[in-house]
Amino acid sequence: MTVALPASSPATFEIKSANLPLVALLLKSPDLDALARDLALRFGDIPDFFDNDPLVVELSALAADERAIDFATLMTLLRSYRVAPVAVRGGNPAQMDAAQAAGLLAAPDARITAARTQEPPITRLQAAPPVEAPAMAAPPPGALVIDKPLRSGQQVYARGRDLVVLAMVNAGAEVIADGHIHVYAPLRGKAMAGARGNADARIFALSLEPELLSIAGIYRTSENPLPEGVWGQPTQVRLVPGPDGDKLVMEPIKVSGKA
């Protein structure tokens, strides 16, 4: 005999499935002093790069390393950059036990998007008042558009979207975007596209005269001369994979009325 029990739903809660977007720290060394220096070089001048993003610590590169990791110190360091370490994956049993003892959750099923290369540190920039989009819970669709010249010391960061600049980016200014960067004027400062590891991001400039170019952390400074035919010309910059890793490739853009 089949018995049908009446269904009931709690008045105070419901259980639902949820997806949580995470950023990941691919830890390659247990030396936290070195990590602190590299984080300061990469993010010290961009205090709003993260917005209390939940973070998973990826330990697969250290699974064979027997040196201890001070997870309490690591978590304090990461929180100082406005990220919230919540989980860990990929470590050996001792590392996973130590991480969980420090309060991190084991997340073996967390999916981490593989970057083509690890981001090298970017030259530290002089502190300057930033020029930013208004703070929002989630970036609106479309690009962040800047229609005024950027002076030396000014900084613009387009979080989660493209950046379009309609005026000159002077030497000493800095433009950063998680997506593409378009500069419809001379680009004479620093431009960093794909700031969170998007290797498909590109930089477009009407006149390329930069101090620094970077895509997904792969960068080139003015100390290395640009390829012949692109200085001061309409140019696109993109990442191209190669046997020795990704490299920045600069290609002239044909503009009507120009060769």
Image: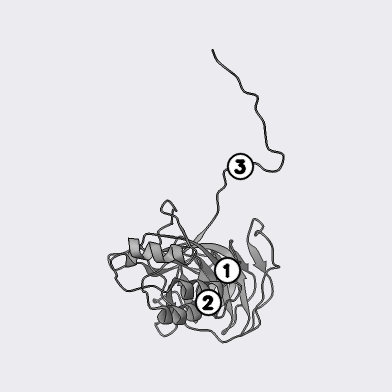
Mark in front: 1 vs 3: 3
Q: Residue furthest top?
A: 1
Dot 3 and dot 2 residues touching (CB under 8 Å): no
| Dot 1 or dot 3, earlier in sequence | 3
Q: Nearer the viewer, residue 198 or 22?
A: 22
Residue 175 visible in the picture? yes
Q: Which residue in the protein does label 2 denote?
A: 43
The disc at residue 15 is 3
Badge 2 element: helix
Residue 158 image offset from top left, x and y in percent: 61, 67
Q: Nearer the viewer, residue 46 or 107?
A: 107
For the residues labelled 1 and 3, the Cα–Cα distance comes to 29 Å
Mark in front: 3 vs 2: 3
Residue 181 image offset from top left, x and y in percent: 55, 67
Residue 142 image offset from top left, x and y in percent: 64, 57
Within 10 Å of the Cα at label 3, are there few (<14), some (14-19), or many (20+) other Cα atoms? few
For the residues labelled 3 and 2, the Cα–Cα distance comes to 38 Å
Location of residue 56 with respect to 45 vertically, above or below: above
At label 2, the amino acid type is: Phe
Residue 50 image offset from top left, x and y in percent: 58, 68
The disc at residue 50 is 1
Location of residue 95 with respect to 209 vertically, above or below: above
What colouring method underlies this structural image? one colour
| Residue displayed at 54% across by 80% down | 44
At label 3, the amino acid type is: Ile
| Residue displayed at 48% across by 73% down | 72
At label 1, the amino acid type is: Phe
